[in-house]
Amino acid sequence: MKLVLPVALQDQISREAKAAYPRECCGLIEGVEDGGGFRATLLHPARNLAAAADRFDLDPADHIAALKAARARGHALIGCYHSHPDGDSVPSRADQSGAAQANFIWLIAATDGAQCRVAGFVYRSPDFAELALCASVGADLVTSSLNVRN
């Protein structure tokens, strides 16, 4: 399975992860199903209500607002993104215990505050499967990889 993720959205996740460092950033991914995969169209940054710096808890009000906005455009919330400060761009134990929705995309941005590496996964109970991220600029597909670095 793949996710077409515009370069501008990759850059946005990287900026948010670096800005939130040493805490986790988080948000939701708006998009559509696209020929056996997904296409991200917009990101909805969310407030992180988690008390611990190495956890994320999306603000329910931000989640509802993102859901309404996506539906108004005929889209869906196809996934979430968050950062792992000083960590790896792989699902953590906390991510695994918090995942519930099948075929929901998880983008994880590992950052040290200066560099950022984004990887994609799709939740398939009881675990995650790695997701191919395909970068696009406008309507053009420019690169395909499992990990994107900024």
Image (tube, rainbow, N blue to C red):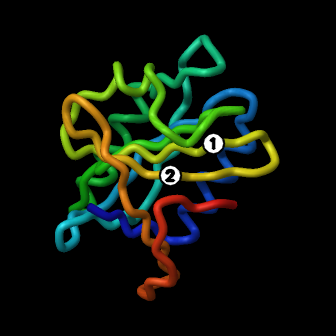
Pinpoint residue 31: horizontal percent, then vertical percent. Answer: 31, 60
Residues tagged 2 and 1 counted as in contact (Cβ below 8 A): yes
Left or right of 79 on screen, residue 35:
left
Q: Secondary structure at mark 1?
A: strand
Q: Is residue 11 above or below residue 45?
A: below
97 or 137: nearer the viewer: 97
Residue shown at 50%/51% (left/top)? 119
Mark earlier in primary sequence (2, 1): 1
- Seen from this angle, which residue lies furthest bottom? 140
Q: Secondary structure at mark 2?
A: strand
Q: Amino acid at mark 1?
A: Ala
Residue shown at 55%/26% (left/top)? 48
Mark 1: give few (<14), some (14-19) or many (20+) Cα within 10 Å. many
- Which residue is label 2 attached to? 119
Pinpoint residue 41: horizontal percent, then vertical percent. Answer: 39, 65
Pinpoint residue 104: horizontal percent, then vertical percent. Answer: 27, 44
Find residue 145 and name its label.
Answer: none
- Which residue is label 1 attached to? 110
Q: Amino acid at mark 2?
A: Ala
Left or right of 75 on screen, residue 10:
right
Pinpoint residue 55: horizontal percent, then vertical percent. Answer: 55, 21
Q: Quadrant of residue 127?
A: top left
